[in-house]
Image (cartoon, rainbow, N blue to C red):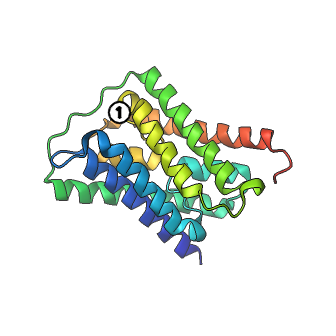
Amino acid sequence: MSVNKYLTEFIGTFFLVATIGFTVLKPGDAGNLAPLAIGSVLMVMIFAGGHVSGAHYNPAVTLAVFLRGKCPASDVVPYIVAQCLAAAAAAAIVLFMKGNPPVEALQPDVLRALVAEFLYTFALCYMVLNVATAKGTSGNSFYGLAIGFTVLVGAYSVGSVSGGAFNPAVAVGVTMMGLSKLANIWIFLVADFAAGAAAALTFRFINPNDK
């Protein structure tokens, strides 16, 4: 049933965003180990929900998989709504558990943040399409690990530049938690959705016979 897919997307996105908040916000933050926890929770949630919904947990990934031809149009909006609602719920839970701590929002350089978000969201979506939707890798058992590690790499590489969201739902969550200003949410939305579309077009160009 479709509701099972949407619930799976909600659960996976919830724990991704909650882990970001719990490991980044003080008190009790994980410091330099936060990206490891974030990549790991994404990995395990993908293994848990991949067989139900495809385990997107990311509106940019949903767009990429749709444009690649592996996500029905009827699922696109419900997936994105479920992901964003989950991010909002996770942010609320984190703030409650942390006692609404004072947070200093990242002040990114807009151009550098756009480039950083585009590059690593592209890497994430391109990699998802290749390990989770391609004929040549069908039935593999490593896709969750590969996806989680891509987020890990991106967070360590450019997290200090853009915040390392690579995910519009994560952008909703970190904005609600005060880690990023509402005025900057457009950076994530523009760069991440553009990267998802670019990844799908690139995949289709490289793999013209993989329909």
Q: Can residue 62 be seen from the camera position used here? A: yes
Q: Is residue 179 left or right of residue 113?
A: left
Query: As drawn, which residue projects farthest toward the right?
Result: 209
Residue drawn 65% across the image and 63% down it: 74
In this rendered view, identify the residue nearer to me: 18 or 150: 150
Residue drawn 61% across the image and 50% down it: 128
Quarter of the image where the N terminus is located: bottom right
Residue drawn 58% across the image and 38% down it: 123
Query: As drawn, which residue projects farthest toward the front?
Result: 141
Name the amino acid type tagged 1: Ala
Residue 196: name its quadrant.
Answer: top right
Residue drawn 37% across the image and 47% down it: 36
Helix, strand or loop for disc 1:
helix
Give how far across and how far down residue 2 sits, in percent: 58, 73
Is residue 130 depicted above or below 50 in this figure? Answer: above
In this rendered view, identify the residue nearer to me: 116 or 71: 116
Q: Which residue is mark 1?
A: 183
Give how far across and how far down residue 177 sits, in percent: 27, 46
Give how far across and how far down residue 32 sits, in percent: 29, 39
Quarter of the image where the C terminus is located: bottom right
Q: Can residue 84 be seen from the camera position used here? A: no
Give how far across and how far down residue 97 sits, in percent: 18, 59
Q: Is residue 69 left or right of residue 28?
A: right
